[in-house]
Image (spheres, rainbow, N blue to C red):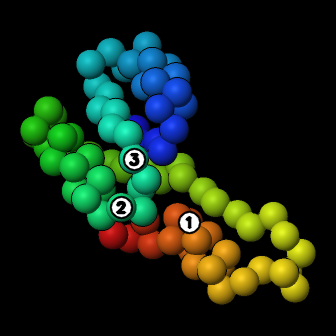
Amino acid sequence: VADRRADDLQRHAEKWNAAFPGRVVALPGDIRNGDLQASLVSACLERFGTVDFLVNNAANQATLPIAEVTPEHWHDVQSVNVEAALY
C-alpha cells in the first residue's frame, strides 16, 4: 500500500492488515516516483519472496471543463493513471 497522505496510508494499512494479518507492506509516497515503486517491489520481495499480483488503485482526474485543461493537467492525470502502472 502506498499513499501520499500519511493519515490515509495508516487507515488503509490498518484495514488491509485486519483482513490479511502480516501480509501488507505500506510505504508513504507518490506512486509516480520510480524510487517508491522500486522500494515497494523490494520490500515485498524481501518480506514475501515473490510478488504474485499487483493492484493499481491510484487514480487522478482534472475536474475542469475540457477547454481549461492544460498540458500540465493532462500530464499529471496520465502520470498517475497510466505511467505509474507501467513503470
Image vertical order of residue 4 relative to residue 32, above or below: above
Q: Amino acid at mark 3?
A: Gly
Q: Are marks 1 and 3 in contact (CB under 8 Å)?
A: no
- Looking at the rendered image, the quarter that the C terminus falls into is bottom left
Image vertical order of residue 72 relative to residue 55, above or below: below
Nearer to the camera, 33 or 58 = 33
Q: Which residue corresponds to mark 3? A: 29
Specify whether residue 8 is in view: yes
Nearer to the camera, 42 or 23 = 42
* Structural distance between the alpha carbons of marks 1 and 3: 16 Å
Q: Which residue corresponds to mark 2? A: 33
* Structural distance between the alpha carbons of marks 2 and 3: 8 Å
- Residue at 39 percent across and 19 percent down: it is 17
Specify whether residue 16 is in view: no
Q: Amino acid at mark 2?
A: Asn
Q: Which residue corresponds to mark 1? A: 81
- Residue at 14 percent across and 43 percent down: it is 45
Q: Secondary structure at mark 3?
A: loop
Mark identifier at residue 14: none
Q: Are marks 2 and 3 in contact (CB under 8 Å)?
A: yes
Image coords of residue 26 (percent x, y): 34, 33
Q: Earlier in the sequence, mark 1 or mark 3?
A: 3
Q: Amino acid at mark 1?
A: Asn
Image quarter for residue 21? top left
Q: Are marks 2 and 1 in contact (CB under 8 Å)?
A: no
- Residue at 84 percent across and 70 percent down: it is 64
